[in-house]
């Protein structure tokens, strides 16, 4: 009987873990889709272009490393620069809205 309970517990917990992974994949896909619809800096834009188009960031992080990577933080996203050019833009946690529950994730 103990083995049966242990086996059922293992099967149940494995199923829950797989649901969590599937949920994370869905959220990642939705984040990518939402970021594509947003007006964000794109790879290759200069710092001056980003500043002119999106205004002053909330905060700036000084460049570190070699090559130097700097970060500008805006209200709902951050943009990363290598030297003077945009590498990529990242949405902050909570920006993507889960359409099923209508809550931020």
Image: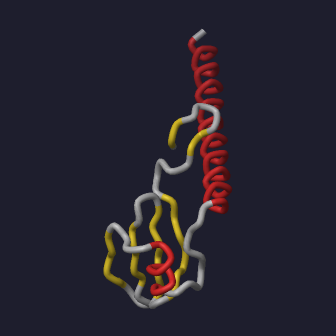
* Quarter of the figure with the N terminus: top right
Is 102 placed above or below 70 here? Answer: above
Q: Position of residue 69 (x, y in %)?
A: 42, 82
The residue lying furthest to the top in this view is 1
Between 92 and 51, the residue placed more toward the observer is 51
Is 84 placed above or below 70 here? Answer: below
Residue 10 shown left or right of residue 66 in the figure: right
User: Which residue is pictured at 33% across the width and 75% down the height?
Assistant: 60
Q: Position of residue 65 (x, y in %)?
A: 38, 86
User: Which residue is pictured at 46% across the width and 90% down the height?
Assistant: 84
Give the tally of numbered discs: 0
Q: Position of residue 59 (x, y in %)?
A: 32, 70
User: Which residue is pictured at 58% across the width and 21% down the height?
Assistant: 9
User: Which residue is pictured at 37% across the width and 74% down the height?
Assistant: 56
Specify how the rendered protein is coloured.
secondary structure
Question: Residue 67 lies in what quarter of the image?
Answer: bottom left
Is 51 placed above or below 15 here? Answer: below
Residue 99 shown left or right of residue 92 in the figure: right
Residue 1 shown left or right of residue 55 in the figure: right
């Amino acid at each position: 009987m103990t083995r049966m309970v242990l086996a059922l517990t293992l099967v149940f917990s494995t199923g829950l873990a797989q649901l969590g992974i599937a949920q994370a994949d869905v959220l990642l896909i939705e984040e990518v889709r939402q970021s594509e619809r947003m007006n964000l800096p794109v790879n290759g834009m200069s710092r001056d272009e980003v500043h002119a188009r999106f205004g002053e960031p909330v905060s700036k992080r000084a460049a570190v490393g070699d090559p130097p990577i700097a970060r500008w933080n805006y209200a709902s996203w951050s943009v990363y620069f290598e030297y003077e050019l945009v590498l990529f833009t990242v949405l902050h946690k909570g920006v993507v809205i889960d359409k099923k529950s209508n809550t931020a994730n």
